[in-house]
Amino acid sequence: MKKTFGKLQNGENVEIYTLNNSKGMKMNVITYGGIISSLCVPNKNGEIIDVVLGYDNLEGYVGNTCYFGALIGRYGNRIGDGKFSLDGKEYQLAKNDHDKNHLHGGIVGFNKMVWDVVEFNQNENGDSITLSYLSKNGEEGYPGNFKVFVTYSLNNNNELVINYDAETDETTVCNLTQHTYFNLNGHNSGDVLKHKMLINADAFIPTDADSIPTGEIQSVAGTDFDFKTLIEIGARINNESEQLVFAGGYDHNWCLNKDEENQLTHAATAFSDVSGVAMDTFTTEPGMQFYTANYLDGTITGKNGTVYNSRNGFCHETQHYPDSPNQSNFPSTELKAGEKYSTKTVYKFYINKTPFEL
């Protein structure tokens, strides 16, 4: 189903598409930012709850500085000092993160663009939508004309599957991700500190006080970042270790355990005893940013008049590592002309069960 969601100041229309599956799940996607504006799943009582934070109207998303539900590019996460070098040439990007670093694609990133709908399919196996966007050479300082396609599929296994595909006509850097804030009790149910979390990673990336990687890849063993077994998000989040103090909670990249590069593997599990909803995250990406909505501060009024406060949601941003263009020991984010960029992430939902430690 397709409807008009609103109109931008320049007169451009923004549409909203509804995807369904046969198990009672429903998702709304708007063409502005490729944003997932709602994701409804059944809980253990048979009630349908919306498990993503967001707004009721386009105006909220246009003014949104928290990236609710949005596609992120050309480079998700941070690039230190807003610059990098390719083939001996330095590129300067916008310093839109405290006037120091580059964040989530810049001042007008992919989250602020109206995406084209290439295809919208509704069938008995679930619904899907493919969006596309052409990021022109020089946009936000990046080299190359960069064409990207993103497909959201909602299938009858209660999986939200996201496929990212892109190509360029000039060597560039790219790191596409999705910035949905989840709350498995419902978007309007308060903090997520009692949610249990597992992250399939032996190491994480420490950062400086501005959230830029130090270059180290650190073992999670014996730290507040060890989620190798299910533990409440809030169990250690208020500890006074340097990394938690820097970020005001969790806002770090975990280096996911993989036997082979680019294989689809289990990255994380989240679970709420209250709703009985569990979510497994799978990805081909080498990393995942686990973010606990530390910067929400009660000044945002979202869907149904809900005021969003700190830690009212969490993000599983599957990705390459932050600041990779400036860190030679991190997996490369370079994409050359003629090469194909292709990654996949799956969010799978369950009621009171999951294959991973429940």
Image (cartoon, grey):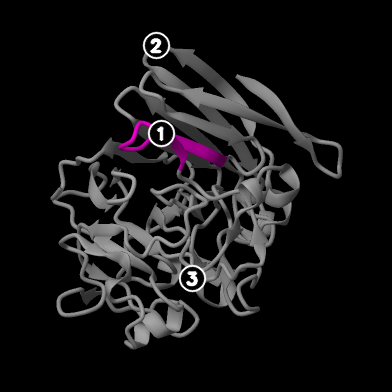
**Residue 138 image offset from top left, x and y in percent:** 67, 55
Q: Nearer the viewer, residue 99 or 227?
A: 227
Question: Is residue 308 shown left or right of residue 352?
Answer: right
Percent of width and height locating residue 248 = 45, 78
Q: Nearer the viewer, residue 336 or 235?
A: 235
What is the crowding at mark 2: few (fewer than 14 residues within 10 Å), some, or many (at least 20)? few
Decide: is 169 above or below 46: below
| Kind of element beneath mark 1 | loop
Q: Earlier in the sequence, mark 3 or mark 2?
A: 2
The majority secondary structure of the magenta stretch comes to strand
Residue 41 in the magenta stretch? The answer is yes
Query: Which residue carries the number 3 mark?
Result: 294
Front position among marks 1 and 3:
1
Q: Is residue 137 above or below residue 289?
A: above
* Label 1–label 3 contact, CB within 8 A: no
Magenta residues span: 36-50
Q: Is residue 86 left or right of residue 116?
A: left
- Left or right: residue 230 compared with residue 99: left
Decide: marks 1, 2 in contact (CB < 8 A)? no
Identify residue for label 1.
47
- Is 292 drawn above or below residue 28 in the view shown? below
> Residue type at mark 1?
Glu
Q: According to the image, label 2 marks what residue?
A: 124
